[in-house]
């Protein structure tokens, strides 16, 4: 578990360093649109990786338990454009019911 958080911290620092180095290296010139889209997606990719690791991993093992059902509910609710309160509370309820039944 420690190595996961070490990787998350390293990636977070690298993301911050890239965002800081950009204006310094470019000297106020605008970044190309193709490069800007990559920089904007770094934080989202880091968060998505953390969610996947925490949902499906335990140590060095792949775990499929109640959290997977909650995450599946959240994905479907977001896809159906449900309000965020419904997504979060519904995912928590589905996870709790699955843990209760198992």
Image (tube, rainbow, N blue to C red):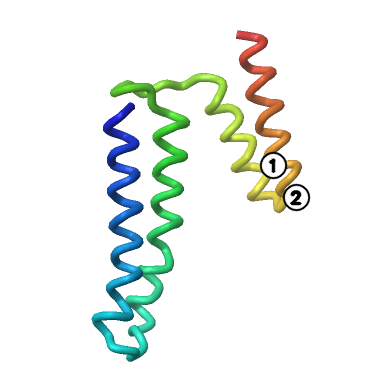
| Residue shown at 69% from the left, 42% from the top | 87
Question: Where is the N terminus found, in terms of image quarters?
Answer: top left
Q: Position of residue 35 (x, y in %)?
A: 33, 76
| Residue shown at 30% from the left, 67% from the top | 18
Q: Which mark is residue 55?
A: none
Whole-number angstrom distance, CA of label 2 to CA of label 1: 6 Å
Q: Position of residue 17 (x, y in %)?
A: 29, 64
State if disc 1 and disc 2 touch (CB < 8 Å): yes
The foreground one among 2 and 41 is 2
Q: Which residue is mark 2?
A: 83
Circle 1 SS class: helix
Q: Position of residue 91 (x, y in %)?
A: 66, 33
Residue 101 lies, with reference to residue 88, above or below; the image says above
**Which residue sits furthest bottom?**
29
Q: Which mark is residue 87?
A: 1
The foreground one among 7 and 54 is 7
Q: Position of residue 32 (x, y in %)?
A: 33, 84
| Residue shown at 68% from the left, 26% from the top | 94
The foreground one among 74 and 46 is 46
Residue 85 lies, with reference to residue 1, above or below; the image says below
Figure label count = 2
Please tell me in which quadrant of the rendered image residue 5 appears: top left
Residue 96 lies, with reference to residue 7, above or below; the image says above
| Residue shown at 66% from the left, 11% from the top | 100
């Amino acid at each position: 578990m420690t190595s996961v958080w070490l990787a998350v911290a390293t990636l977070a620092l690298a993301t911050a360093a890239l965002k800081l180095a950009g204006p310094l290296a470019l000297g106020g010139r605008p970044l190309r649109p193709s490069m800007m889209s990559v920089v904007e997606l770094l934080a989202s990719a880091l968060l998505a990786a953390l969610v996947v690791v925490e949902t499906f991993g335990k140590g060095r093992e792949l775990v499929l338990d109640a959290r997977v059902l909650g995450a599946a509910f959240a994905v479907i609710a977001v896809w159906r454009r449900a309000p965020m309160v419904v997504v979060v509370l519904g995912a928590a309820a589905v996870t709790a019911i699955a843990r209760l039944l198992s």
